[in-house]
Image (cartoon, grey):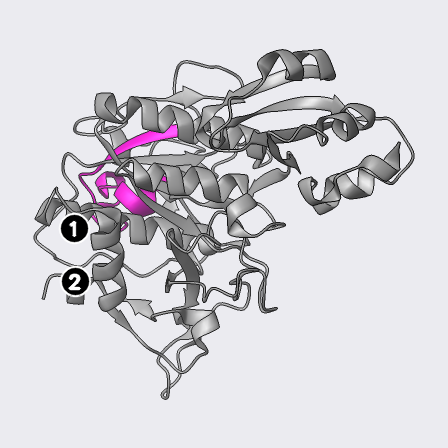
């Protein structure tokens, strides 16, 4: 039977399971060719559990036995079978160090711009709900709760970097876009973990509801190990589809540095604005700054130079989920991405008609190079003051 397996349709992890001579059930994402319809009847007959219909990638997520996977590879309409890989929050180390005030006076505040934060949820911190709540909605793909919460803290911290107004600190820990609206989507559990299929379903939901929430930006402070080239990567496909639907997509590159070839998906997309981390606490007279040791380096499997740019990501002070007025410090490219998302929100105040490509060009043109490889820094450090000069 195995002699008839079409290995070209299987990702490396699924290939390994097929060759293991067991018939266990594993979670997979099955995508069909763009001009073919998903065969729901076929999937239902072969799978143990259908988890999601995923029109965003013209496919579905299900639990399927190895034997059924082998069978489905013979269907000429099936494009690829990938493992429903774990996705995780890109947080490195928490420290008791106060971060610098990174907000510059741009004349814009992100007002009326909604940013979707795909993460661990959100705690209704004073800096987001006073004097008026800017949490415009909440979607929970983990526990299906209706009221906003964050049992991990990662999503709340990212939201504060992006859009905290400094209410509890008298402006000291104000975010980049202090009047932007936040649409938190909880897709990662209390340990900061989730599945690729959850993220795909989330992006699909954001696209479907973008007019209702006036969503313009998606912030990914999470990622999965990049196992495939762009054309077959489900997360990249979803991110690119969001861009096609006039959303601006910004993603952290990961915390797997200093090794090269460690950019996580969906930051591997050539279209997505991918963000690495700067350690401005390691300043010296020559460079004034340094790449964070943990920040992932390029290139991608498709030999694309990544990251696109870098922003501070070490010892960043932002909102705590422990109480409504507390702050804490975290490090990681997770902290860098919302800084860039905040800058994008400011740009949309300047011109609401900017597309993803307009925003990306303006951000990269506003960067300052340092003494580091382009595979570490991309276009360089984002300098918000240069965006509006």
Q: Look at 41% across and 27% down and name the residue there.
A: 204
In the image, the segment drawn in magenta is 159-184
Please tell me the numbered disc located at residue 387.
2
Judged from the image, the secondary structure of the residue bearing numbered disc 1 is: helix
**Crowdedness of circle 2 by 10 Å Cα count: few (<14), some, many (20+)?**
some
Instruction: Report the quarter where the C terminus lies.
Output: bottom left
Q: Where is residue 345 drawn, in percent x and y?
A: 21, 45
Q: Where is residue 135 drawn, in percent x and y?
A: 28, 27
Q: Look at 31% across and 61% down and name the residue there.
A: 100
Viewer-side residue, 315 vs 311: 311
Residue 142 in view here: no
Q: Quadrant for residue 163, please give it.
A: top left
Indicate whether 237 appears above or below 91.
above
Query: Image check: 73 left or right of 51?
Result: right
Indicate whether 341 appears above or below 199.
below
Residue 113 in view here: yes
In the image, is residue 158 part of the stretch drawn in magenta? no
Judged from the image, the secondary structure of the residue bearing numbered disc 2 is: helix
Q: Where is residue 186 drawn, in percent x and y?
A: 46, 28
Viewer-side residue, 322 vs 174: 174
Question: Hey, which residue is sitting farthest front in the picture?
Answer: 76
Kindly report the distance in space between the C-alpha atoms of the residues bearing marks 2 and 1. Answer: 8 Å
Circles 2, 1 touching at the beta carbon (< 8 Å) = yes
Per the image, the residue denoted by label 1 is 347
Query: Image check: 320 left or right of 71?
Result: left
């Amino acid at each position: 039977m195995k002699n008839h397996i079409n290995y070209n349709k299987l990702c490396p992890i699924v290939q390994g399971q097929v060759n293991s001579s067991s018939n266990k059930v594993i979670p997979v994402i099955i995508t069909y060719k763009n001009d073919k319809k998903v065969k729901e009847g076929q999937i239902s007959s072969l799978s143990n559990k259908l988890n999601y219909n995923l029109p965003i990638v013209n496919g579905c997520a299900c639990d399927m036995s190895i034997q059924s996977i082998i069978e489905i590879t013979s269907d000429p309409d099936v494009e690829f079978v990938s493992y429903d890989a774990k996705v995780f929050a890109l947080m490195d180390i928490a420290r008791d160090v106060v971060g610098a005030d990174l907000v510059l006076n741009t004349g814009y505040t992100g007002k009326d711009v909604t940013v979707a934060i795909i993460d661990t949820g959100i705690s209704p911190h004073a800096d987001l709900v006073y004097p008026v709540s800017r949490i415009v909605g909440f979607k929970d793909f983990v526990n299906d709760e209706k009221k906003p919460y964050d049992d991990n803290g990662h999503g709340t911290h990212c939201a504060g970097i992006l859009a905290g107004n400094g209410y509890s600190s008298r402006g000291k820990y104000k975010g980049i876009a202090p009047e932007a609206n936040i649409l938190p989507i909880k897709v990662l559990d209390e340990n900061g973990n989730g599945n690729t299929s959850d993220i795909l379903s989330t992006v699909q939901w954001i696209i479907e509801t973008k007019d209702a929430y006036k969503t313009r930006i998606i912030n990914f402070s999470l990622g999965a190990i990049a196992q495939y080239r762009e054309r077959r990567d489900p997360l990249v496909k979803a991110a690119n589809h969001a861009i096609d639907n006039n959303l601006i997509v910004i993603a952290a590159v990961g915390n797997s540095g200093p090794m090269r070839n460690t950019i996580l998906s969906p930051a591997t997309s050539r279209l997505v604005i991918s963000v690495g981390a700067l350690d401005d606490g390691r300043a010296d007279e020559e460079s004034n700054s340094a790449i964070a040791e943990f920040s992932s380096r390029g290139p991608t499997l498709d030999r694309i130079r990544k990251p696109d740019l870098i922003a501070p990501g070490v010892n960043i002070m932002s909102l705590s989920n422990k109480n409504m007025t507390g702050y804490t410090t975290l490090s990681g490219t997770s902290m860098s991405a919302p800084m860039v998302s905040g800058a994008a929100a400011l740009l949309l105040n300047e011109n609401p008609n900017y597309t993803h490509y307009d925003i990306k060009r303006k951000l990269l043109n506003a960067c300052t190079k340092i003494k580091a490889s382009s595979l570490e820094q991309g276009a360089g450090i984002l300098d918000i003051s240069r965006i509006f000069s």
